[in-house]
Amino acid sequence: MTDVLPDRLCVDPDSPFHDADVLAKGIGVRFKGEEKTNVEEYCVSEGWVRLAVGNRVDRRGKALTVKLQGPVEPYVKGE
């Protein structure tokens, strides 16, 4: 892998950990060895992911999430 991915990344544009340039590359996340497609945010050093819970949203229109602990492996799709 030629690109170094950030330790923490979020898809929410209001988050300080949002990086549109990195997200445009197509980031995939393996959590506990399984490919996850509903990741809203991850942190490699702390070992957690936030996964969207279905299509449910809060009163501000943000996706409801659940935080799970475990090994996180982000990668650029297509590499």
Image (spheres, rainbow, N blue to C red):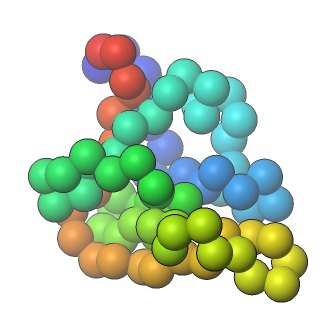
Position of residue 13 relative to residue 58, above or below, is above
Q: Residue at x 35, y 70 (%)?
A: 48
Q: Decide if residue 63 is on the left or right side of residue 30.
A: right
Residue 48 visible somewhere in the drawing: yes
Position of residue 12 relative to residue 1, above or below, is below
Q: Position of residue 16 (x, y in %)?
A: 73, 59
Q: Residue at x 54, y 22 (%)?
A: 25
Q: Position of residue 61 (x, y in %)?
A: 81, 71
Which of the two residues, 29 or 15, is positioned nearer the viewer here?
29
Q: Decide if residue 53 is on the left or right side of residue 28.
A: right
Q: Decide if residue 47 is on the left or right side of residue 6.
A: left
Q: Position of residue 75 (x, y in %)?
A: 34, 33
Q: Position of residue 44 (x, y in %)?
A: 35, 58
Q: Residue at x 59, y 31 (%)?
A: 22
Residue that extends furthest to the right in the rendered view of this protein = 60
Which of the two residues, 61 or 31, is positioned nearer the viewer here?
61
Quadrant (top left, top right, bottom left, bottom right) of the N terminus: top left
Position of residue 37 relative to residue 52, above or below, is above
